[in-house]
């Protein structure tokens, strides 16, 4: 049984759930419930998006949105036009 409080185990389980055969998906849904699996998947995708599209606040370490990604070609202090 997977410990749902261990992020690495949850990540591995979700990978198996999304990429494995239908029989494995049904097994997870039977064990944990379809709603719980969908909630875990949604949470994982949200955390992944936040991690890829934010940086830590220098004061409180909370994630803050990155307005201009580094790969956009925009340089701080320079006009885009």
Image (tube, rainbow, N blue to C red):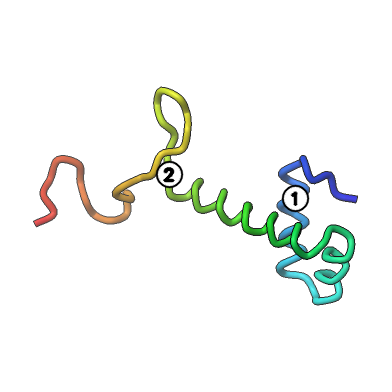
In the image, residue 76 above or below residue 30: above
- Look at the numbered disc 1 and give the secondary structure of its residue: helix
Q: Identify the residue under disc 2.
A: 54
Q: Which residue is drawn at 43% across and 49% down?
A: 53
Mark identifier at residue 10: 1
Q: How many labels does the image show?
A: 2
State the image coordinates of residue 29 (x, y, percent, origin top left): 83, 65
In the image, residue 80 above or below residue 5: below
Q: Which residue is drawn at 11% across and 49% down?
A: 79
Question: Which of these two is toward me, 26 or 69?
Answer: 26
Q: In this view, does 14 lie to the left or right of 81?
A: right
Q: Which residue is drawn at 49% across and 48% down?
A: 50
- Look at the numbered disc 2 and give the secondary structure of its residue: strand
Mark identifier at residue 31: none
Graded by Cα atoms within 10 Å as few (under 14), some (14 to 19) or many (20 or more), the crowding at tag 2 reads some
* C-beta proximity under 8 Å, tags 1 and 2: no
**Outermost residue, front direction?**
35
Q: In this view, does 42 lie to the left or right of 81?
A: right
Answer with mark 1 or mark 2, whichever residue precedes in sequence. 1
**Outermost residue, top direction?**
59
Find residue 4 and report its image quarter. top right
Q: Residue at x 47, y 28 (%)?
A: 61
State the image coordinates of residue 10 (x, y, percent, origin top left): 75, 50
Q: Quadrant of the C terminus?
A: bottom left
What's the CA distance linking mark 1 and mark 2?
22 Å
State the image coordinates of residue 55 (x, y, percent, origin top left): 42, 39
State the image coordinates of residue 52 (x, y, percent, origin top left): 47, 50
In the image, residue 28 above or below residue 73: below
Find residue 80 and report its image quarter. bottom left
Graded by Cα atoms within 10 Å as few (under 14), some (14 to 19) or many (20 or more), the crowding at tag 1 reads some
């Amino acid at each position: 049984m997977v410990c749902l409080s261990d992020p690495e185990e949850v990540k591995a389980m979700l990978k198996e759930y999304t990429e494995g055969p239908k029989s494995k998906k049904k097994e997870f849904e039977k064990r944990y419930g379809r709603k719980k699996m969908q909630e875990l998947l949604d949470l994982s995708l949200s955390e992944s998006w936040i991690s890829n599209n934010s940086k830590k606040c220098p004061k409180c370490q909370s994630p803050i949105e990155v307005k201009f990604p580094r790969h956009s070609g925009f340089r701080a202090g320079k006009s885009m036009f």
